[in-house]
Amino acid sequence: MLQVGSRRYALQVRTEPRLTHTASLKKGIIELRLADSDGGASLQKNIRTLLSRVVASDFLPEITRRTHQLNELHFSKPIKSVTLRYAHGRWGSCSSSGRINFSTRLLFAPPFVVDYVIIHELAHLLEHNHSDRYWKIVEKAMPAYEEAEKWLKENGHQCDF
């Protein structure tokens, strides 16, 4: 069983004589079909990647919707795209062209932390740095943002597949 946010996924794992790994999600069941020739650390990394991709596809509509809601509420800036993929070193990023990326690790965090990371990235649509002006923009949108930052510092290491 895999718990991600409020969603629970049953896991079915099959090892088969094949060259590649695949994953699919049907009715709350993630099916992993693994190549029997893979093993050790490589296999663990591949499983994490597969799980992350499947869960990302399930959560992307929700994260995209929330990103647009918070943007309309606080920023009203154009967003080119929202993506969700595994990134270990960062929670999110925002390009100058309005492409916003979030790590699937964020899906393990509570909703107020997810909102903070979304707001953090949306604020970069106005200010592409972490200047005092930038932090005032974040604080205006989420006055208690420091609580979310504290949560990430204390618990972020547990947010992973």
Image: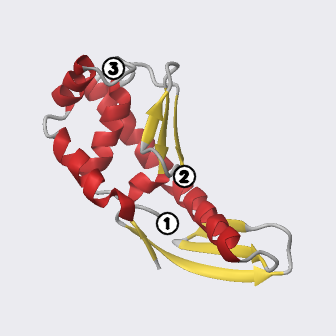
Residue that badge 3 annotates: 76
Question: Disc 2 or 1, which lies upstream in sequence?
Answer: 2
Q: Which amino acid does label 2 sit on?
A: Tyr
Q: Which of 135 and 114 is in front in this view?
A: 135
Q: Which amino acid does label 1 sit on?
A: Phe
Q: In this view, does 11 lie above or below 5?
A: below
Query: At which x and y percent is residue 15?
Result: 75, 82
Q: What is the basis of the colouring in this image?
A: secondary structure
Residue 107 visible in this rendered orientation of the protein = yes
Instruction: Locate residue 41: give its quadrant.
Output: bottom right
Q: Distance between the residues labelled 2 and 3?
A: 27 Å
Residue that badge 2 annotates: 86
Query: At which x and y percent is residue 40?
Result: 68, 76
Q: Is residue 18 above or below residue 100?
A: below
Q: Is residue 6 above or below residue 113?
A: below
Determine crowd level at label 1: few under 14, some 14-19, many 20+ residues with C-alpha closer than 10 A: some
> Disc 1 or disc 3, which is closer to the eye?
1
Residue that badge 1 annotates: 161
Query: At which x and y percent is residue 4?
Result: 41, 65
Pointers 2 and 1 in contact (C-beta within 8 Å)? yes
